[in-house]
Image: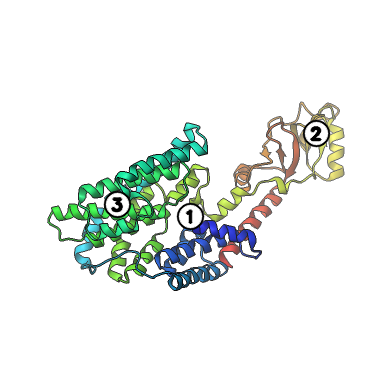
Amino acid sequence: VHFGATLGIVVNRFVSSRLSHEVYLGCGVAAAISAGFGAPIAGIVFAHEAILRHFSVRAIAPISIASVTASAVSQAFFSHSATFEISSSAPDLVSLIPVLIIASPIIAFAAIIYMEALRRSAAFAKQTGWSAERLILTAATICGLVGIWIPEILGLGISTINAMLDGAYQMPALLLLLVVKIAMTALCIGFGLFGGVFSPALFVGVAAGGIVAQLAMILGVPDLSVAVSIAAMAAVAANVIGAPVAAVLIVLELTQSYAYAVAALMAVMASMLLTHRLFGHSFFDRQLLDRGIDLAQGREAIALSQHTLEPHLSDDFVAVSETSTGHEALSLMREKQQTEAYVVSDSGRLAAKLSVHQAIEAGDQTVFQFADADPLLLHVDDSLQHAMHVVSDFVGESVPIIDQQNRELLGVINEGDLFKAVIDVQSMVRHQERD
Protein backbone atom coordinates (compact mmCIF):
# COMPACT_ATOMS: atom_id res chain seq x y z
CA VAL A 1 0.00 0.00 0.00
CA HIS A 2 2.81 2.38 0.95
CA PHE A 3 4.72 1.53 -2.21
CA GLY A 4 1.63 1.94 -4.39
CA ALA A 5 0.89 5.35 -2.89
CA THR A 6 4.48 6.42 -3.54
CA LEU A 7 4.27 5.35 -7.17
CA GLY A 8 1.01 7.26 -7.57
CA ILE A 9 2.65 10.49 -6.40
CA VAL A 10 5.71 9.88 -8.61
CA VAL A 11 3.46 9.49 -11.67
CA ASN A 12 1.67 12.70 -10.75
CA ARG A 13 4.97 14.60 -10.90
CA PHE A 14 5.61 13.55 -14.49
CA VAL A 15 2.07 13.61 -15.89
CA SER A 16 0.13 16.80 -16.43
CA SER A 17 -3.64 16.46 -16.04
CA ARG A 18 -6.65 18.01 -14.34
CA LEU A 19 -6.70 15.25 -11.72
CA SER A 20 -5.64 16.25 -8.22
CA HIS A 21 -2.67 14.64 -6.46
CA GLU A 22 -5.02 12.77 -4.11
CA VAL A 23 -6.60 10.98 -7.08
CA TYR A 24 -3.15 9.81 -8.21
CA LEU A 25 -2.52 8.70 -4.65
CA GLY A 26 -5.79 6.75 -4.69
CA CYS A 27 -4.89 5.16 -8.04
CA GLY A 28 -1.57 3.91 -6.65
CA VAL A 29 -3.16 2.51 -3.50
CA ALA A 30 -6.01 0.82 -5.38
CA ALA A 31 -3.56 -0.74 -7.83
CA ALA A 32 -1.41 -2.05 -4.99
CA ILE A 33 -4.35 -3.69 -3.21
CA SER A 34 -5.67 -5.09 -6.48
CA ALA A 35 -2.37 -6.57 -7.66
CA GLY A 36 -1.21 -7.70 -4.24
CA PHE A 37 -4.37 -9.47 -3.13
CA GLY A 38 -6.19 -10.07 -6.39
CA ALA A 39 -9.06 -7.92 -5.14
CA PRO A 40 -9.79 -5.10 -7.62
CA ILE A 41 -13.18 -4.16 -6.16
CA ALA A 42 -11.75 -3.96 -2.65
CA GLY A 43 -8.91 -1.83 -4.03
CA ILE A 44 -11.36 0.68 -5.48
CA VAL A 45 -13.39 0.90 -2.28
CA PHE A 46 -10.24 1.06 -0.14
CA ALA A 47 -8.90 4.06 -2.07
CA HIS A 48 -12.16 5.97 -1.65
CA GLU A 49 -12.82 4.90 1.93
CA ALA A 50 -9.34 5.31 3.43
CA ILE A 51 -7.59 7.79 1.13
CA LEU A 52 -10.10 10.13 -0.53
CA ARG A 53 -12.89 9.70 2.03
CA HIS A 54 -15.53 10.58 -0.55
CA PHE A 55 -16.92 9.20 -3.80
CA SER A 56 -16.96 11.23 -7.01
CA VAL A 57 -17.13 10.49 -10.74
CA ARG A 58 -13.84 12.26 -11.40
CA ALA A 59 -12.04 10.05 -8.87
CA ILE A 60 -13.77 6.70 -9.27
CA ALA A 61 -13.14 6.44 -13.02
CA PRO A 62 -9.30 6.64 -12.97
CA ILE A 63 -9.09 4.66 -9.72
CA SER A 64 -11.24 1.89 -11.20
CA ILE A 65 -9.09 1.79 -14.33
CA ALA A 66 -5.91 1.61 -12.25
CA SER A 67 -7.26 -1.13 -10.00
CA VAL A 68 -8.63 -3.35 -12.76
CA THR A 69 -5.54 -2.84 -14.93
CA ALA A 70 -3.24 -3.77 -12.05
CA SER A 71 -5.22 -6.95 -11.45
CA ALA A 72 -5.15 -7.88 -15.14
CA VAL A 73 -1.41 -7.23 -15.48
CA SER A 74 -0.71 -9.20 -12.31
CA GLN A 75 -2.64 -12.19 -13.63
CA ALA A 76 -1.04 -11.95 -17.08
CA PHE A 77 2.62 -11.72 -16.05
CA PHE A 78 2.74 -13.52 -12.73
CA SER A 79 1.57 -16.94 -11.67
CA HIS A 80 -1.88 -16.40 -10.22
CA SER A 81 -2.57 -18.06 -6.92
CA ALA A 82 -4.74 -17.19 -3.97
CA THR A 83 -3.02 -14.93 -1.45
CA PHE A 84 -4.47 -16.88 1.44
CA GLU A 85 -4.92 -20.63 1.21
CA ILE A 86 -8.21 -21.62 2.84
CA SER A 87 -8.87 -25.34 2.74
CA SER A 88 -11.91 -25.63 5.01
CA SER A 89 -15.39 -24.50 4.15
CA ALA A 90 -17.11 -21.72 6.09
CA PRO A 91 -18.93 -22.94 9.21
CA ASP A 92 -22.52 -22.22 10.02
CA LEU A 93 -23.01 -18.57 10.96
CA VAL A 94 -25.27 -19.54 13.87
CA SER A 95 -22.33 -21.13 15.67
CA LEU A 96 -19.77 -18.55 14.50
CA ILE A 97 -21.47 -15.21 15.25
CA PRO A 98 -21.66 -15.63 19.07
CA VAL A 99 -17.97 -16.48 19.20
CA LEU A 100 -17.08 -13.39 17.14
CA ILE A 101 -19.19 -11.09 19.31
CA ILE A 102 -17.52 -12.38 22.48
CA ALA A 103 -14.09 -12.24 20.80
CA SER A 104 -14.51 -8.68 19.50
CA PRO A 105 -13.04 -7.00 22.62
CA ILE A 106 -9.93 -9.19 22.34
CA ILE A 107 -9.57 -8.35 18.64
CA ALA A 108 -10.05 -4.65 19.34
CA PHE A 109 -7.50 -4.85 22.16
CA ALA A 110 -4.94 -6.41 19.78
CA ALA A 111 -5.54 -3.66 17.22
CA ILE A 112 -5.19 -0.92 19.84
CA ILE A 113 -1.94 -2.40 21.19
CA TYR A 114 -0.57 -2.57 17.65
CA MET A 115 -1.47 1.05 16.85
CA GLU A 116 -0.25 2.37 20.21
CA ALA A 117 3.04 0.52 19.74
CA LEU A 118 3.51 2.27 16.39
CA ARG A 119 2.81 5.68 17.91
CA ARG A 120 5.00 5.19 20.97
CA SER A 121 7.90 3.83 18.93
CA ALA A 122 7.86 6.91 16.70
CA ALA A 123 7.64 9.19 19.74
CA PHE A 124 10.57 7.40 21.41
CA ALA A 125 12.67 7.66 18.25
CA LYS A 126 12.02 11.41 18.17
CA GLN A 127 12.95 11.81 21.83
CA THR A 128 16.31 10.05 21.41
CA GLY A 129 17.64 12.83 19.21
CA TRP A 130 19.53 10.27 17.13
CA SER A 131 20.24 10.81 13.47
CA ALA A 132 18.09 9.07 10.86
CA GLU A 133 20.99 6.80 9.93
CA ARG A 134 21.53 5.69 13.52
CA LEU A 135 17.83 5.01 14.04
CA ILE A 136 17.56 2.93 10.87
CA LEU A 137 20.72 0.98 11.63
CA THR A 138 19.52 0.26 15.17
CA ALA A 139 16.11 -0.97 14.01
CA ALA A 140 17.59 -3.08 11.22
CA THR A 141 20.13 -4.67 13.57
CA ILE A 142 17.60 -5.54 16.28
CA CYS A 143 15.04 -6.84 13.78
CA GLY A 144 17.70 -8.90 12.01
CA LEU A 145 18.89 -10.49 15.23
CA VAL A 146 15.34 -11.33 16.29
CA GLY A 147 14.62 -12.64 12.79
CA ILE A 148 17.44 -15.17 13.11
CA TRP A 149 15.54 -16.90 15.91
CA ILE A 150 11.98 -16.11 14.77
CA PRO A 151 12.11 -15.78 10.96
CA GLU A 152 8.30 -15.93 10.70
CA ILE A 153 8.03 -12.24 11.68
CA LEU A 154 10.16 -11.01 8.75
CA GLY A 155 8.70 -9.66 5.51
CA LEU A 156 5.04 -9.53 4.60
CA GLY A 157 4.37 -12.77 6.44
CA ILE A 158 1.96 -14.23 3.87
CA SER A 159 3.42 -17.75 4.18
CA THR A 160 3.22 -17.53 7.98
CA ILE A 161 -0.38 -16.31 7.77
CA ASN A 162 -1.25 -19.31 5.60
CA ALA A 163 0.48 -21.60 8.08
CA MET A 164 -1.53 -20.09 10.94
CA LEU A 165 -4.74 -20.54 8.95
CA ASP A 166 -3.73 -24.17 8.37
CA GLY A 167 -3.41 -24.74 12.12
CA ALA A 168 0.38 -25.17 12.15
CA TYR A 169 0.85 -23.18 15.40
CA GLN A 170 -0.45 -23.79 18.87
CA MET A 171 -1.42 -21.05 21.32
CA PRO A 172 2.06 -20.40 22.86
CA ALA A 173 3.60 -20.04 19.41
CA LEU A 174 0.76 -17.79 18.22
CA LEU A 175 1.15 -15.57 21.27
CA LEU A 176 4.91 -15.31 20.70
CA LEU A 177 4.44 -14.45 17.03
CA LEU A 178 1.79 -11.85 17.88
CA VAL A 179 3.94 -10.06 20.46
CA VAL A 180 7.17 -10.16 18.45
CA LYS A 181 5.49 -9.09 15.19
CA ILE A 182 3.92 -6.06 16.88
CA ALA A 183 7.20 -5.14 18.57
CA MET A 184 9.39 -5.47 15.47
CA THR A 185 6.90 -3.71 13.19
CA ALA A 186 6.63 -0.81 15.64
CA LEU A 187 10.41 -0.64 15.97
CA CYS A 188 11.08 -0.64 12.23
CA ILE A 189 8.35 1.82 11.22
CA GLY A 190 8.87 4.07 14.23
CA PHE A 191 12.62 4.27 13.61
CA GLY A 192 12.22 5.16 9.93
CA LEU A 193 12.53 1.95 7.92
CA PHE A 194 10.44 1.82 4.75
CA GLY A 195 7.22 -0.11 5.16
CA GLY A 196 3.50 0.02 5.72
CA VAL A 197 1.10 -0.97 8.48
CA PHE A 198 -1.47 -2.90 6.44
CA SER A 199 0.24 -6.26 5.91
CA PRO A 200 1.44 -6.48 9.52
CA ALA A 201 -2.15 -5.72 10.58
CA LEU A 202 -3.29 -8.82 8.67
CA PHE A 203 -0.63 -10.87 10.48
CA VAL A 204 -1.67 -9.49 13.87
CA GLY A 205 -5.33 -10.20 13.12
CA VAL A 206 -4.78 -13.81 12.08
CA ALA A 207 -2.58 -14.48 15.13
CA ALA A 208 -5.12 -12.89 17.48
CA GLY A 209 -7.94 -14.83 15.82
CA GLY A 210 -6.05 -18.09 16.19
CA ILE A 211 -5.54 -17.45 19.89
CA VAL A 212 -9.23 -16.67 20.35
CA ALA A 213 -10.28 -19.81 18.45
CA GLN A 214 -8.02 -22.05 20.52
CA LEU A 215 -9.29 -20.49 23.74
CA ALA A 216 -12.83 -21.20 22.53
CA MET A 217 -11.92 -24.83 21.83
CA ILE A 218 -10.64 -25.20 25.39
CA LEU A 219 -14.07 -24.06 26.55
CA GLY A 220 -15.77 -26.71 24.42
CA VAL A 221 -16.61 -24.72 21.29
CA PRO A 222 -16.14 -26.58 17.96
CA ASP A 223 -13.05 -25.81 15.90
CA LEU A 224 -13.67 -22.44 14.19
CA SER A 225 -10.02 -21.49 13.79
CA VAL A 226 -10.05 -20.57 10.11
CA ALA A 227 -13.26 -18.54 10.18
CA VAL A 228 -12.36 -16.68 13.39
CA SER A 229 -8.83 -15.97 12.13
CA ILE A 230 -10.11 -14.56 8.84
CA ALA A 231 -12.71 -12.43 10.60
CA ALA A 232 -10.10 -11.18 13.08
CA MET A 233 -7.72 -10.42 10.22
CA ALA A 234 -10.34 -8.24 8.55
CA ALA A 235 -11.25 -6.59 11.86
CA VAL A 236 -7.69 -5.60 12.83
CA ALA A 237 -6.97 -4.36 9.31
CA ALA A 238 -10.20 -2.33 9.27
CA ASN A 239 -9.41 -0.78 12.65
CA VAL A 240 -5.89 0.16 11.61
CA ILE A 241 -6.68 1.65 8.20
CA GLY A 242 -10.18 2.90 8.96
CA ALA A 243 -11.78 1.13 5.98
CA PRO A 244 -14.34 -1.41 7.23
CA VAL A 245 -16.15 -1.91 3.92
CA ALA A 246 -12.90 -2.48 2.02
CA ALA A 247 -11.71 -5.00 4.61
CA VAL A 248 -14.92 -7.00 4.26
CA LEU A 249 -14.69 -6.88 0.45
CA ILE A 250 -11.12 -8.16 0.58
CA VAL A 251 -12.36 -11.19 2.49
CA LEU A 252 -15.21 -11.66 0.03
CA GLU A 253 -12.96 -11.50 -3.03
CA LEU A 254 -10.25 -13.70 -1.52
CA THR A 255 -12.54 -16.42 -0.18
CA GLN A 256 -15.43 -16.16 -2.67
CA SER A 257 -17.64 -16.92 0.32
CA TYR A 258 -20.51 -14.79 1.61
CA ALA A 259 -20.39 -16.67 4.91
CA TYR A 260 -16.79 -15.58 5.51
CA ALA A 261 -17.65 -12.03 4.43
CA VAL A 262 -20.61 -11.82 6.82
CA ALA A 263 -18.44 -13.19 9.63
CA ALA A 264 -15.79 -10.58 8.84
CA LEU A 265 -18.46 -7.87 8.78
CA MET A 266 -19.64 -8.85 12.26
CA ALA A 267 -16.10 -8.86 13.69
CA VAL A 268 -15.20 -5.59 11.98
CA MET A 269 -18.21 -3.64 13.20
CA ALA A 270 -18.21 -5.02 16.74
CA SER A 271 -14.49 -4.36 17.27
CA MET A 272 -14.59 -0.90 15.66
CA LEU A 273 -17.14 0.24 18.23
CA LEU A 274 -14.44 -0.20 20.86
CA THR A 275 -11.40 1.04 18.98
CA HIS A 276 -13.24 4.14 17.76
CA ARG A 277 -14.07 5.08 21.35
CA LEU A 278 -10.76 4.09 22.96
CA PHE A 279 -8.27 5.01 20.22
CA GLY A 280 -9.83 6.74 17.24
CA HIS A 281 -11.15 6.06 13.76
CA SER A 282 -7.84 4.67 12.49
CA PHE A 283 -4.09 4.78 12.97
CA PHE A 284 -3.80 7.36 10.19
CA ASP A 285 -6.46 9.59 11.76
CA ARG A 286 -4.64 9.44 15.08
CA GLN A 287 -1.34 10.34 13.40
CA LEU A 288 -2.93 13.41 11.86
CA LEU A 289 -4.63 14.29 15.14
CA ASP A 290 -1.20 14.22 16.81
CA ARG A 291 -0.19 16.86 14.25
CA GLY A 292 -3.23 19.01 14.97
CA ILE A 293 -5.39 17.85 12.04
CA ASP A 294 -8.74 16.43 13.09
CA LEU A 295 -10.35 14.55 10.20
CA ALA A 296 -13.49 14.10 12.28
CA GLN A 297 -14.30 17.76 11.61
CA GLY A 298 -14.90 17.00 7.94
CA ARG A 299 -13.28 18.00 4.67
CA GLU A 300 -14.63 21.56 4.72
CA ALA A 301 -13.21 22.28 8.17
CA ILE A 302 -9.83 20.83 7.19
CA ALA A 303 -9.76 22.90 4.00
CA LEU A 304 -10.62 26.06 5.97
CA SER A 305 -7.84 25.28 8.45
CA GLN A 306 -5.34 25.08 5.57
CA HIS A 307 -6.21 28.46 4.02
CA THR A 308 -4.72 31.48 5.74
CA LEU A 309 -5.83 35.12 5.78
CA GLU A 310 -2.83 36.39 3.82
CA PRO A 311 -4.47 36.26 0.35
CA HIS A 312 -7.48 38.15 1.70
CA LEU A 313 -5.72 41.21 3.15
CA SER A 314 -7.23 44.56 2.25
CA ASP A 315 -5.42 47.91 2.35
CA ASP A 316 -8.68 49.85 2.28
CA PHE A 317 -8.51 51.30 5.78
CA VAL A 318 -7.84 54.61 7.53
CA ALA A 319 -4.52 54.91 9.35
CA VAL A 320 -3.72 57.82 11.68
CA SER A 321 -0.67 58.58 13.78
CA GLU A 322 -0.57 58.56 17.56
CA THR A 323 -0.40 62.37 17.57
CA SER A 324 -3.35 62.93 15.24
CA THR A 325 -6.31 64.83 16.64
CA GLY A 326 -9.90 63.72 16.62
CA HIS A 327 -10.79 66.28 13.93
CA GLU A 328 -7.98 65.04 11.68
CA ALA A 329 -9.12 61.46 12.10
CA LEU A 330 -12.73 62.43 11.33
CA SER A 331 -11.61 64.18 8.17
CA LEU A 332 -9.80 61.06 6.94
CA MET A 333 -12.78 58.84 7.81
CA ARG A 334 -15.13 61.16 5.98
CA GLU A 335 -12.85 61.17 2.93
CA LYS A 336 -12.76 57.34 2.75
CA GLN A 337 -16.36 56.96 3.93
CA GLN A 338 -15.43 54.71 6.83
CA THR A 339 -16.40 54.69 10.49
CA GLU A 340 -13.18 53.26 11.91
CA ALA A 341 -9.50 54.14 11.88
CA TYR A 342 -6.32 52.51 13.10
CA VAL A 343 -3.76 54.31 15.22
CA VAL A 344 -0.36 53.32 13.86
CA SER A 345 3.10 54.17 15.20
CA ASP A 346 5.90 55.56 13.02
CA SER A 347 7.27 52.01 12.63
CA GLY A 348 3.91 50.74 11.34
CA ARG A 349 3.00 49.01 14.60
CA LEU A 350 -0.70 48.88 15.47
CA ALA A 351 -1.25 50.93 18.63
CA ALA A 352 -5.05 51.12 18.87
CA LYS A 353 -8.36 51.15 17.02
CA LEU A 354 -10.48 54.29 16.79
CA SER A 355 -14.22 54.49 16.17
CA VAL A 356 -16.00 57.52 14.76
CA HIS A 357 -17.61 58.17 18.15
CA GLN A 358 -14.22 58.14 19.86
CA ALA A 359 -12.86 60.56 17.24
CA ILE A 360 -15.73 62.96 17.88
CA GLU A 361 -15.10 62.70 21.61
CA ALA A 362 -11.38 63.42 21.11
CA GLY A 363 -12.02 66.66 19.18
CA ASP A 364 -8.83 68.76 19.24
CA GLN A 365 -7.04 66.29 21.50
CA THR A 366 -4.85 63.39 20.33
CA VAL A 367 -6.83 60.27 19.52
CA PHE A 368 -4.52 57.77 21.21
CA GLN A 369 -5.91 58.34 24.70
CA PHE A 370 -9.49 57.80 23.46
CA ALA A 371 -8.89 54.81 21.15
CA ASP A 372 -9.23 51.13 22.05
CA ALA A 373 -5.71 49.89 22.83
CA ASP A 374 -6.80 46.25 22.93
CA PRO A 375 -8.98 45.66 19.87
CA LEU A 376 -9.94 42.33 18.36
CA LEU A 377 -6.94 41.11 16.30
CA LEU A 378 -6.13 38.50 13.70
CA HIS A 379 -2.69 37.32 12.63
CA VAL A 380 -1.68 37.03 9.01
CA ASP A 381 -1.03 33.28 9.34
CA ASP A 382 -4.35 32.55 11.05
CA SER A 383 -6.60 30.12 9.20
CA LEU A 384 -10.02 30.98 7.86
CA GLN A 385 -11.50 28.51 10.32
CA HIS A 386 -9.84 30.26 13.27
CA ALA A 387 -10.87 33.66 11.94
CA MET A 388 -14.52 32.59 11.77
CA HIS A 389 -14.44 31.59 15.43
CA VAL A 390 -12.74 34.86 16.42
CA VAL A 391 -15.23 37.14 14.65
CA SER A 392 -18.33 35.16 15.65
CA ASP A 393 -19.24 37.83 18.24
CA PHE A 394 -17.55 40.75 16.47
CA VAL A 395 -19.41 44.02 15.95
CA GLY A 396 -17.69 46.57 13.74
CA GLU A 397 -16.51 47.49 10.27
CA SER A 398 -13.28 45.52 9.92
CA VAL A 399 -10.73 43.49 11.88
CA PRO A 400 -7.03 44.40 11.79
CA ILE A 401 -4.56 41.77 10.60
CA ILE A 402 -1.08 42.07 12.06
CA ASP A 403 2.29 40.37 11.97
CA GLN A 404 2.53 38.19 15.06
CA GLN A 405 6.20 38.99 15.60
CA ASN A 406 6.24 42.81 15.61
CA ARG A 407 2.52 43.72 15.61
CA GLU A 408 2.90 45.53 12.28
CA LEU A 409 -0.46 46.36 10.71
CA LEU A 410 -0.51 44.50 7.39
CA GLY A 411 -4.12 45.07 6.41
CA VAL A 412 -7.71 44.51 7.45
CA ILE A 413 -10.57 42.20 6.59
CA ASN A 414 -14.27 42.91 6.88
CA GLU A 415 -16.91 40.34 7.66
CA GLY A 416 -18.21 40.26 4.09
CA ASP A 417 -14.79 39.41 2.61
CA LEU A 418 -14.19 36.79 5.29
CA PHE A 419 -17.55 35.13 4.67
CA LYS A 420 -16.91 35.15 0.91
CA ALA A 421 -13.52 33.49 1.37
CA VAL A 422 -15.08 30.80 3.56
CA ILE A 423 -17.90 30.18 1.09
CA ASP A 424 -15.40 29.91 -1.79
CA VAL A 425 -13.41 27.23 0.04
CA GLN A 426 -16.56 25.32 0.97
CA SER A 427 -17.75 25.44 -2.63
CA MET A 428 -14.39 24.14 -3.84
CA VAL A 429 -14.58 21.16 -1.47
CA ARG A 430 -18.18 20.37 -2.43
CA HIS A 431 -17.25 20.57 -6.11
CA GLN A 432 -14.45 18.03 -5.57
CA GLU A 433 -16.85 15.68 -3.81
CA ARG A 434 -19.63 15.97 -6.41
CA ASP A 435 -17.60 16.13 -9.61
Mark closer to the chain start, 1 or 2: 1
What's the amino acid at mark 2? Answer: Ala
- Quadrant of image for the C terminus: bottom right
Check residue 2 in the rendering and tell me which mark sits there, or answer none: 1
What's the amino acid at mark 1? Answer: His
Which residue of the protein is positioned furthest toward the front in this rendering? 148
Locate residue 350: give its quadrant. top right
> What residue did someone put label 3 on?
107
Mark closer to the chain start, 2 or 3: 3
Q: Residue at x 36, y 46 (%)?
A: 114
Instruction: List x then y, in percent, for residue 295.
Output: 50, 51
Which residue of the protein is positioned furthest toward the left in this rendering? 220
> What residue did someone put label 2 on?
359
Name the element at disc 2. Answer: helix
Report the front residue among 430 and 8: 8
Give the crowd class for mark 3: few <14, some 14-19, many >=20 residues within 10 Å.
many
Instruction: List x then y, in percent, for residue 160.
Output: 30, 56
Name the element at disc 1. Answer: helix
**Relative to residue 346, is residue 393 depicted above or below?**
below
Q: Nearer the viewer, mark 3 or mark 1?
A: 1
Give the crowd class for mark 1: few <14, some 14-19, many >=20 residues within 10 Å.
some
Q: Residue at x 86, y 33 (%)?
A: 327
Viewer can see residue 271: no
Marks 2 and 3, how far apart in space?
Answer: 69 Å
